[in-house]
Amino acid sequence: MQTNLLRAALWMSGAIVSFSAMAVAGREVAETLNTFELMFYRSVIGFGLVLVLILASRRGFGQVVTRHPRQHFWRNVAHFAGQNAWFYGVAAIPLSQLVALEFTNPLWVALLAPLFLGERMTLVRALAAVLGFLGILIVARPGLAPIEWGHAAGMAAAFFFALNTLFTRRIMGHDTVICVMFWMTLSQAGMGLVFALPGSIPWPPPDIFAWVALTGVCGLTAHYALTSALACAPATVVAPMEFGRLPLIALIGFFRYDEPLEAAVAIGAVLIVTANLVNLREERAQGRQHRAI
């Protein structure tokens, strides 16, 4: 794959803006819609956009046919759980804390990959995981600051997003991005409908409908931009760029929601980011060893 750092950086900038906008939109609608209702509307909007992409494509609906529906099912269950937890955390704790906890996703991937993908757990990966979870303790500060359900939601989101990553690795070996997005939005609209129906599903009032629509649009643009960045450069180059989302979301939280800029969050985030960089370096080294063999 030919590396184009400038294009990768531009695509990742789009992904960072999309993820940050989705966090703000989720915070704005939290008092009106619960996470299941938001996921229903988000997925319906996303599904409509995916249909437009399919109809505009020469390949049409043939590109959404899959021989591995079970893999898509478990991927979307994990993503649905993680996204609901993430939207809960958006409304419950400062945005900077949530994003810092979310960045443990790659560490969970490293810990779970031996079970799901048969990858070897190395000493470096284990030490990176320990360093990352030390960062979690500094961010959450158990015993010094009250631990809220939002912190648990942030950790749960990172865990389920890691499962989603592992399932996606398998799926991308035989299916297209459009196929993944089609089944993701369709199945998650159904899951959101099932879980939201017992309490009835309110129609979003006019003052927040734009925020609801923004979650649907940004949910697709964020993943499209991230996938496009990975097409321009290796994951070891692209992944560190995403860490720029933390200072941006911290500034958004400070200026829009009067959330304090806490040193503990910054220190913990540095440890988590460092652990991820160590993990990425080890992954690249393991890749070189496999190619040499």
Image (spheres, rainbow, N blue to C red):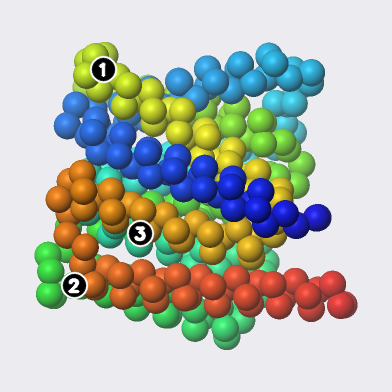
2 vs 1, front mark: 1
The residue pinned by badge 2 equals 142
In primary-sequence order, the first of circles 2 and 3 is: 2
Where residue 75 sits, quadrant-wise, is top right
Question: Type of residue at label 2?
Answer: Pro
Question: Type of residue at label 1?
Answer: Pro
The correct choice, above or below, for 267 with respect to 244 in the image is below
The dot on residue 247 is 3
Mark 2 crowd level (few <14, some 14–19, many ≥20, 10 Å Cα): few
Give me the residue at 12% from left, 69% from top: 145
SS class, disc 3: helix
Q: CA distance from mark 1 to mark 3?
A: 31 Å
Where does the image place residue 14, in percent across and percent down from the top left? 52, 42
Viewer-nearest residue: 91 or 143: 91
> Is residue 55 among the parts visible in the rendering?
yes
Q: CA distance from mark 2 to mark 1?
A: 37 Å
The correct choice, above or below, for 33 with respect to 122 in the image is above
Q: Are marks 2 and 3 in contact (CB under 8 Å)?
A: no
The correct choice, above or below, for 28 with respect to 59 in the image is below
> Is residue 200 among the parts visible in the rendering?
no
The residue pinned by badge 1 equals 204
Question: Type of residue at label 3?
Answer: Pro
Mark 3 crowd level (few <14, some 14–19, many ≥20, 10 Å Cα): some
The C terminus, quarter of image: bottom right
SS class, disc 1: loop
In primary-sequence order, the first of circles 1 and 3 is: 1
Give me the residue at 59% from left, 23% from top: 50
